[in-house]
Amino acid sequence: MCRWSVLAGAIWANLTLASVGYAQQPPTPPPPQPAYGPAVTTDQAKRAVAAALAEAKKSPYLYVFAVVEPSGSLVYFERMDGAALYAANESAIRKARTAALFKRPTADFFNLMESGHSFVATVTPELSASIGGVPLVVDGKIIGGIGVAGSPSGPIDLAPAEAGANALK
């Protein structure tokens, strides 16, 4: 009888102490988002699109480029000659707006959707969860966003968008 009491006590102690070690830790808060700065100028927008265009010419696709200010208002828009995918016009603008308004690349929303968090689709009708939108950051502040569309897949749109954003750093 004593042996069973000792064994039961040992099991109880093990379960009790082990459960304390596995308690859920509070989530780590995300890093703070950069503040908004002055709106992107037309000259900066053209410089970003020129860099994106140079990168885009390395692929066989014809792209559309959009640059918006932090409010999401369009500042500059350019299409490569022959870009026949007219839906890409609105897609590029929506990608740029999403990146500027939400202060993060549209790839973040794409990744949430892909991991089963479909609530992203209900945030706002303007949100784009397609890769190819990147915030424009100068001196640590968001001055707008650039969106690129036209390839058969958002991940392919990312390289020109990043090249455009990097041109202003």
Image (cartoon, helix red, strand yellow):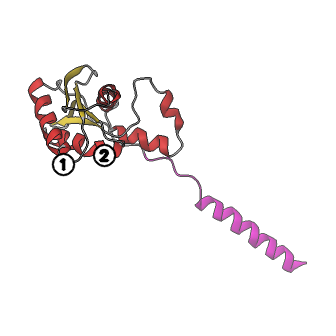
Q: Which residue is mark 2?
A: 156
Helix, strand or loop at mark 1: loop
Magenta stretch bounds: 1-28
- State the residue in front, 149 or 34: 149
How far across and how far down the image is residue 113, in percent? 48, 40
Percent x, y of residue 101? 32, 27
Residue toward you, 87 or 103: 87
Verify whether residue 3 appears in magenta: yes
**Where is residue 57 drawn, in percent x and y?**
17, 44
Occupied quadrant, residue 130: top left
Q: Which residue is mark 1?
A: 58
Q: Is residue 36 magenta?
A: no
Q: Is residue 4 above or below residue 165?
A: below
Q: Quadrant of residue 103?
A: top left
**Circle 1 residues within 10 Å: few <14, some 14–19, many ≥20:** few
* Above or below: residue 23 compared with residue 106: below
Please tell me which residue is depicted at 36% across the width and 43% down the height of the picture.
153
Give the residue displayed 70% in from the left and 65% down from the top: 15
Report the residue at 75% width, 66% height from top: 12
- Residue 60 or residue 23, whichever sits in front: 60
**Magenta residues: mostly which secondary structure?**
helix
Asked if the residue under mark 1 is in contact with the one under mark 2, i.e. CB atoms within 8 Å, the reply is no
Q: From the viewer's perspective, is the residue at label 2 or at label 1 nearer?
A: 1
Q: Between disc 2 and disc 1, whose residue precedes?
A: 1
Q: Of the residues shown, which amino acid type is indicated by label 1?
A: Lys
Task: Decide if residue 149 is on the left or right side of residue 48.
Answer: right
Q: Position of residue 43 (x, y in %)?
A: 8, 27
Q: Which one is in front, 51 or 124? A: 51
